Image (cartoon, helix red, strand yellow):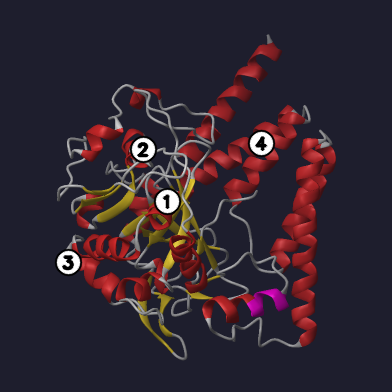
Amino acid sequence: MVSLYSFPCSPAQWTFFLSLLVAGTNAKYSTSRSNQCLYFPAGRLEWSSHFNSCPLPEVIATGKAPVAWSFPPNCITPPPTENKTSPKPDCLFSSTAFRNGHGISLVASTITTSHLIGIGSFNDEPLPLAAQRRESLGPAYKIVPVEGKGMGVVSARHIKRGEIIMMDYPAVLIGTSFLANSKPHHRRRILKKAIKQLPEGTRKKVEGLSRGKEEYEVDAILGPNANTVLVGEEGGGQVHVGLFAETARINHACRPNAHSRFSERRLTMEVMAHRAIKVGEEITMSYIPITTPIEERKKYLKEHWGFECTCSLCRSSPQDIEESESWRRRQKSLKATIQDATSGEFYSDAIAMSEEWLQFADWDMVHPLWPEYHDSLADLYFRNGDMMNAMRYARMAYDGWVKFGSIDDEKLENAKVLVDKLDKISEEKRR
C-alpha cells in the first residue's frame, strides 16, 4: 500500500548538499572488497546469476568494465580523513549508448557503479508487453508553456487511472559523497564535463531547463530540477541526486494527479496517474509528501522553492481545504496505526484500517496504485491465516502488475512468487 516515491530536490536542498563542502563533511564509504556484487534486494528475489560476473571496483575505475563507457573514466580521490583512512575515489562515467542513445553521466564511487553494473541497471531490456501496447497509443504527454508557470507537462491523450504516463532516465546521477568530498572547483569541473559528455539531444534538454539563482551555471541548472533517489551500496542505498530532464518539467500541485517512482534496477523514473486525466489537462505532482499540513506546505514551498502555491486546492474555499486536510490527517494517522497493528500481529485490525485508509485516499482524489494496495492486503490476509482472501488479493495484485507494465518487473515477479506459494499451500491442504 505504501510506495517509495521520489521527491524533487529543492534549490535549498541542493544548496545544503553543497554546504557539505564548506563544512568539510566526509561521507562514509563501505569497506567491503569482496568478489561479489553488493546487492541487498528489498524483495524476495536474489540475483545470484550476477554475483560471479560483477566487476571489482578497481576494474571499473580503469574503464575495463562490462559497460562500454564512451569516455575514459575521470576520477577524483579525496584527501585522507583525520583518522588517516583514504576515502574511495569518485569517478565520472559516461555512456552515450545508455537507453538507446538517451545517455547517462554517473558521478559516483566505484563501489556504487560496480553494484549497478552487477544488478543489470545499465542493461537495455525489452519493454514488457503492456508497455509496448501503451506506446502504440502514442505519446501520453507534451511539454508546453503553462500560464504563470513557465514550461509544464500536459496530457496529449486520455490517460487512465493508474497508467504510466512517463518513463524518464537520469541524464546525470550524482552521489552525495562526491558533493561532500570534492572541492568546489573540482565539483563544478566534473559536473560540467558530465553534462558535456551527454548525447546532443539529452544535453540540449538539460541546458534548456529553467535556471535557479545560483552563481555558477551547473548549480543553477541542478538547483531547481534535481530529484533525490536511493542507489546502491551496503545498508539499502545511499542518497544520490538525479537530473531527469523531462520529469523536471512537471509542476507542483497540493492535490496532484500523478506521482513518481524510481527504480534502481532499471535506473528509471516512472510517473503514473493518481486518477484519470483529460486531454490537455496539466500533469502535476506534489513536491512534498501530500500528508504535510497545509501551512507547512506553503512555508516549505515558499522557503525552498521560492513560489506561492496557487493550485486548485489552495484556491478552494476554507471549508474545502479543511475537509481535505482532515482526510489527510486521518490517512497519516491510519498509515502509522496500520504499521503498528501489523507489527503487533493484529492483522484483522490492520485489514479493516487499510480499507478505511483507501476510502479517505479516494475522497481526497489521491488514489493509491491498485497492485500495491492488493499486494498489501494479500500479505495481511496471509498473515491472518485467511488463505481464500490472501489468494484473491494476490491474484488481483499479479494481474494488476501485468497490466501496469512497469519496466522494473520485480513487483510482478514477487507477486507471482506469492501466488505460487499460496497455490502450493492450498494443494498441500487438499491432500
Label 3 or label 1, whichever lies nearer to me, is 1
Q: Which residue is label 2 attached to?
A: 111
Viewport quadrant of the C terminus: top right
What kind of secondary structure does the magenta stretch mostly adopt? helix
Which residue is under mark 1?
177
Q: Earlier in the sequence, mark 3 or mark 1?
A: 1
Image location of residue 399, percent across then percent down: 53, 42
Disc 2 vs disc 4: Cβ atoms closer than 8 Å?
no
Q: Is residue 145 above or below residue 242?
A: below
Q: Residue 388: x and y, percent?
A: 72, 30
**Labels 1, 2: front one:** 1
For the residue marked with disc 3, what is the amino acid?
Glu
Q: Secondary structure at mark 3?
A: helix
Q: Amino acid at mark 2?
A: Ile
Q: Which residues are magenta?
A: 294-299
Residue at the bottom extreme of this rendering: 148
**Residue 29 quadrant:** top left
Q: Which residue is mark 3?
A: 200
For marks 1 and 4, give the one nearer the viewer: 1
Residue 170 appears in the figure: no
Residue nearer the viewer, 263 or 316:
263
Q: CA distance from mark 4 to mark 3?
A: 49 Å
